[in-house]
Amino acid sequence: MALLTFGVLLFACLHLIKSVAPAFRASMQNRLGENAYKGLFSLLVLAALALVVLGWRGAVPQYIYAPPVPAQHPAMLLLVLAIGLMVVSSRPSRLRRLIRHPQLTGVALWGIAHLLLNGDSRALVLFGGMSIWAIVEIVAINRRDGVWIKDSAPPVQADVINLLITAIVVALLIITHPWIAGVSVTGLLQQ
């Protein structure tokens, strides 16, 4: 469990540097150079992800709570919404006029949905930790950037394309989830 916890903390701290400690980030960029800083940052993020994967696989889960069965379908809807938010985070969308940080909001919803579906210690560390990081990051960025200046609304076709991309990503995740996490999404809903 220590590897998993350290991996989540390392990932969160690395990503919080830009919004919480911009002076430290600038001094590191000046000291190392822009490309060296980006390279070091990327290597550390990869190390954090490796720690998360190794920690998840190596930890023996201890059940803390029983996930509420009636929450399964709403949790799945939250996951679809989370994926849709992650899709629109890098694409034009009318949704971006309603949600300032779609990717971080998507991560928070992804974590919350997984906590509704999993009640073990590993899930609490990974999904709870990532949700807390995303929420803290949203607050820190809002504080750093100040007033939100919204983009103009894109054409409706952009949102139709976003829905299609979301549907494809959801389908791919349903297919690959047993390989990624060792749990079938459809099997979970039949319990």
Image (tube, grey):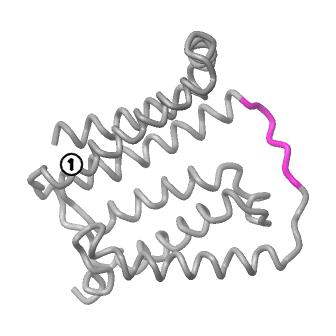
Q: Name the residue type under label 1.
A: Leu
Which secondary structure lies at badge 1? helix
Q: How many marks?
A: 1
Position of residue 18 measured from the top left corner of the image (x, y, whole percent): 59, 27
In depth, the one of 187 and 29 nearer the eye is 29
Q: From the viewer's perspective, is residue 16 above or below residue 138?
A: above
Residue depicted at x 88% and y 64% = 153
Query: Which picture quadrant has residue 103?
Result: bottom right
Main SS category, magenta section: loop
Does 83 sit left or right of 100 as displayed? left
Residue depicted at x 22% and y 71% = 182
Residue depicted at x 55% and y 81% = 168
Position of residue 147 measured from the top left corner of the image (x, y, whole percent): 81, 36
Does 191 sit left or right of 150 as displayed? left
- Residue that badge 1 annotates: 54
Query: Which picture quadrant has residue 11?
Result: top left
Q: Is residue 147 magenta?
A: yes
Give the residues in magenta: 145-151
Position of residue 27 measured from the top left corner of the image (x, y, whole percent): 60, 11
Q: Is residue 1 magenta?
A: no
Indicate the quadrant containing the C terminus: top left, top right, bottom left or bottom right. Answer: bottom left
In depth, the one of 174 and 132 nearer the eye is 174
Position of residue 148 measured from the top left corner of the image (x, y, whole percent): 80, 41
Residue depicted at x 40% and y 47% = 130
Mark 1 packing: few (<14 Cα in 10 Å), some, or many (20+)?
some
